[in-house]
Image (cartoon, rainbow, N blue to C red):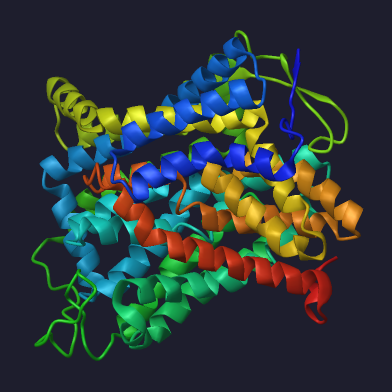
Amino acid sequence: MWQQVYDPFNNVWLSTFAAAIPVVVMLAALAFFHIKAHIAAVMGLVAALVVAIWGFTMPVNTAVASALYGAAYGLFPIGWIILNVIFLYQLTDRKGQFKILRESIAGISGDRRLQLLLIAFSFGAFFEGAGGFGTPVAVTGAMLIGLGFAPLAASGLSLIANTAPVAYGALGTPIIALAGVTGLDMLELSGMVGRQLPLFSLIVPFWLIWAFCGFRGMLAIWPAVLVAGAAFAIPQYLISNFHGPWLVDVGAAVASMVCLTLFLKVWQPKEIWTSASGTFEEGTPSAPTVGGHEYTRKEIIDAWTPWLILSVIVLLWGIPEWKKLLDGISIVKIEWTNLHMLVQKMPPVAPTPKIEEAIFKLNWLSATGTGIFIACIASAFIMGYKIREMLAVYWDTLKLLKYSLITIAAMLALGYLTRYSGVDSTLGLAFANTGMFYPFFGTMLGWLGVALTGSDTASNVLFGGLQKTSAEQLGLSPVLMAAANSSGGVMGKMIDAQSIVVASTATKWYGHEGEILRYVFFHSVALAALVGILVTLQAYVYPFTLLVK
């Protein structure tokens, strides 16, 4: 049994500096030295091994085991999801179905800003709510590339859009996990997050369009942006506060898609923005060509069918009862050698010493990626593929994604190593020692957690208990700060390495992850800071304090 040490150098500043080295190495390699993602990830992993073993006194075999455990999780379920989403895209693209789908979306409006709003924000939110784990960025990134958006714009804008829904992603999993690790009431946590994020569900679509085409370009379509945001924010508040966390994103996303589509049937901007580069092109028509494609209704339905099948199956696979049924007949649990029950989390990170489990759950049938794979096979048969042709496309997809899968495995290896070594907790404690400023920095801690782990669920598991303990010591509401961990975390989603690799893969822009990171970094920090300011107001300033129950 090895006990985690959070100040191995008996100097808070030096220990925090050492804990930050792996993250700094990886991000600097990506953003400043333009090193390819899989190499940067391995560099960060090597740095983390050095820090964990020689700095934080973690046994070598335990450190290596935790890295391998994370790599396995990176390949399954995350890599399994990405592989099959891109497989579906390849299937539809080769049959010309994706071209029809793309032009049918353009038929709703030829304006690129409105297409971006509909796909990246509204449609992407549905996939976040139904499946999470990189699915929305993979789907929307591929769609935007198909519509003619530049790879950087398609990647970065998909990441910016995939923020507001993240706290309730995968049918409420992050909130359910947060309640589990903190012992706080799940419905209270759901409601508190639902009194923080709706404001940002209004802000994010405006921010998204502003990032794409500037303030004036955004101002020209503000009624549509407001409809998309309000139609998401209002159901998000109502469902989270009066029902629970399970269907928040799905319900809000459907409302947003329906309301925006209906609104665009009666309203279009005076000038249609046809450029996918984010700059207005002179001579664009003053009236839209809605439904201007030459496809029949049957062709459009056929083109949408694979994605509708995918939506239905991903939603079905996210239902807890269905997942439990499939797990009952298929799940294999593997106690990870040299790691399971061999690491002990210590106070103040845990209220009492807590032994950490390390059980790899090979839920091969209930995994979201398996549902996507089934959707791919069903869609392939509908599109007329033969089995031999499907295998050829799948092999080509594997070759396309080989470096991306290596990168994801290395990124998750780094994340799990920092978790089991206590390196990330050292960073968390640095945030927790900020006194009256803790509501702001506690929110930023959630942001850091997602940036490191790639998951709001993982960040909640990692820092939820710390948030509760710190809040109680400072006389703050533990529900407020636990919820702030989840709300602040959503803004870290756009810069986590896993999401960036998914985006670069979906847009076929592998090797440019550093450029994507630089594109979204300011947006991530600025939005997270705004969440932190709101939480600070909720903690101290009337009438915002009325939002805290």
At x 35% / y 45%, what residue is drawn? Answer: 30
Position of 373 relative to 170 (above/below):
above
The residue sitting at the top extreme is 337
Residue 474: quarter of image: bottom right
Q: Horizontal placement of 435 versus 89: left or right?
A: right
Image x and y of residue 100, in percent: 15, 56
Q: Position of residue 199 (x, y in %)?
A: 60, 73
Let me know if residue 100 appears in the view. Answer: yes
Regarding residue 332, the answer to whether it shows in the image is no
Q: Residue at x 55, y 59 (%)?
A: 251
The residue drawn where x is 27% and y is 62% is 153
Residue drawn at (17%, 63%), measured in percent from left and top?
103
Q: Closer to the camera, 489 or 188? A: 489
Q: Is residue 194 above or below residue 471?
A: below
Left or right of residue 241, residue 253 in this image: left
- Name the foreground residue: 409 vs 178: 409
Question: Is 309 positioned to the left or the right of 150 in the image?
Answer: right
Residue 227, percent from left and from top? 46, 78
Q: How many marks?
A: 0
Rendered-image quadrant of the N terminus: top right
**Residue 229's spot in the image, x, y percent?**
49, 73
Query: Is the residue 322 above or below the residue 182 in the image?
Result: above
State the quadrant of the C terminus. bottom right
Relative to residue 543, is residue 299 drawn left or right?
A: left
